[in-house]
Amino acid sequence: MLVLVCHGPECGERRGSAAVRAAIEAELGRRPQGGVEVRVDGQCCFGRCASGPNVMVRELPPGEDRAPRPFAGASRGGTLYNAVVPSEAARIVEEHVLGGRIIAAFRRRGPA
Ligand code: FES
């Protein structure tokens, strides 16, 4: 799985997405991952700046490179969570990243 945390100017500088990313990485460090390959990376941006901090979770196809992707190619069928706060990192990791279940309550939050 790939977890992309937006570090754009709104999500990052104004809304503190670095703390969200740190919380996600800490949660991953605390849990056995049961053979699930997980990578956390940054993305700028998802075009939903007013709803940030935004975090996308999506599949990580084998062999996918680490090259930065333009916004148009960022989603690849992923799930975008909006207005994420550090205390929600545990649920994102446990339920979606490791458990494969999308958290509907964390989607479509904030202005469109
Ligand atoms: S700055 Fe995060 S979506 Fe644009």
Image (cartoon, rainbow, N blue to C red):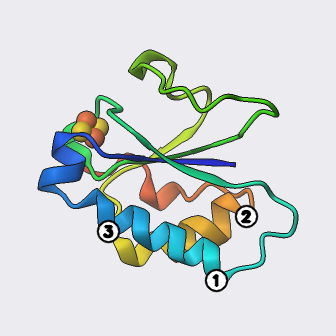
Report the amino acid beneath label 3: Ala
Residue at which label 3 appears: 19
Q: Residue at x 25, y 40 (%)?
A: 8
Q: Residue at x 71, y 29 (%)?
A: 64
Which residue does the numbered mark 2 point to in the structure image? 98
Q: Residue at x 75, y 64 (%)?
A: 99
What SS does tag 3 mark?
helix
Identify the amino acid type marked 1.
Answer: Arg
Quadrant placement of the C terminus: top left
Mark 1, Cα crowd under 10 Å, few <14 / some 14-19 / many 20+, is few
- Relative to 90, does residue 110 appear above or below in the rendering? above
Please indicate whether residue 15 sits to the left or right of residue 66 in the image. Answer: left
- Name the element at disc 1: helix
- The CB of the residue at mark 2 lies under 8 Å from ligand 1: no
Looking at this view, name the residue that lies furthest to the left: 14
Q: Is residue 4 left or right of residue 78?
A: left
Up-down relation of residue 61 to residue 69 (above or below): below
Disc 2 versus disc 3: nearer the observer:
3
Residue 48: percent from left, percent from top: 28, 35
Q: Report x, y in % for residue 90.
A: 54, 76
Image position of 55 (left or right of 104):
left
Label 3 within 8 A of ligand 1 by Cβ: no
Q: Quadrant of ligand 1?
A: top left
Residue 63 screen position, x and y as percent: 79, 30
Residue type at mark 2: give it: Leu
Residue named by callout 1 = 30
